[in-house]
Image: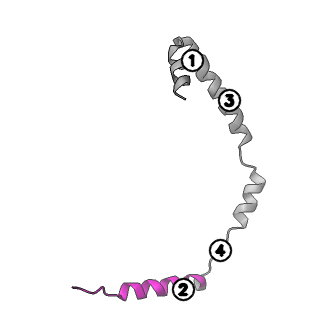
């Protein structure tokens, strides 16, 4: 990586700009390929579990018990 940085620093301002433009171009091509498929995303969202109040009751009970706990003093 250091050698690439050294080579880049030896370029003229115009050449550096060309290299940066090419990097942006390459990145834009990969970005388009990585865009999420909306149909698959919707399927994932629908598959998310939903907790009822009964499911959450155990957490509330444990929270109450934890709040009642008194640490020992030395």
Compare marks 2 and 1 and give the one earlier in the sequence: 1
Considering the numbered disc 4 on the image, is that residue within a helix, a strand or a loop?
loop
In reply to whether residue 34 is colored magenta, the answer given is no
C-alpha separation, residue under disc 3 versus residue under disc 2? 52 Å
- Residue named by callout 3: 26
**Which x, y percent locates residue 48?**
68, 68
C-alpha separation, residue under disc 3 versus residue under disc 1? 14 Å
Q: Residues within 10 Å of mark 3 (few under 14, many from 20)?
A: few
Could you tell me which residue is drawn at 52 percent across and 24 percent down?
5
Whether tag 3 and tag 2 are in contact, CB under 8 A, the answer is no
Q: Residues within 10 Å of mark 1 (few under 14, many from 20)?
A: few
Compare marks 3 and 1 and give the one earlier in the sequence: 1
Which range is magenta?
55-74
C-alpha separation, residue under disc 3 versus residue under disc 4? 41 Å
Residue 49: image quadrant is bottom right
- Residue named by callout 4: 50
Quarter of the picture containing the C terminus is bottom left
- Tell me: residue 61, above or below residue 16: below
């Amino acid at each position: 990586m250091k050698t690439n940085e050294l080579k880049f620093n030896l370029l003229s301002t115009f050449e550096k700009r060309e290299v940066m433009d090419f990097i942006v171009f390459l990145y834009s091509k990969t970005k388009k390929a990585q865009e999420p498929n909306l149909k698959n995303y919707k399927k994932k969202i629908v598959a998310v579990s939903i907790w009822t109040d009964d499911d959450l009751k155990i957490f509330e009970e444990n929270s109450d018990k934890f709040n009642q706990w008194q640490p020992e003093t030395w």
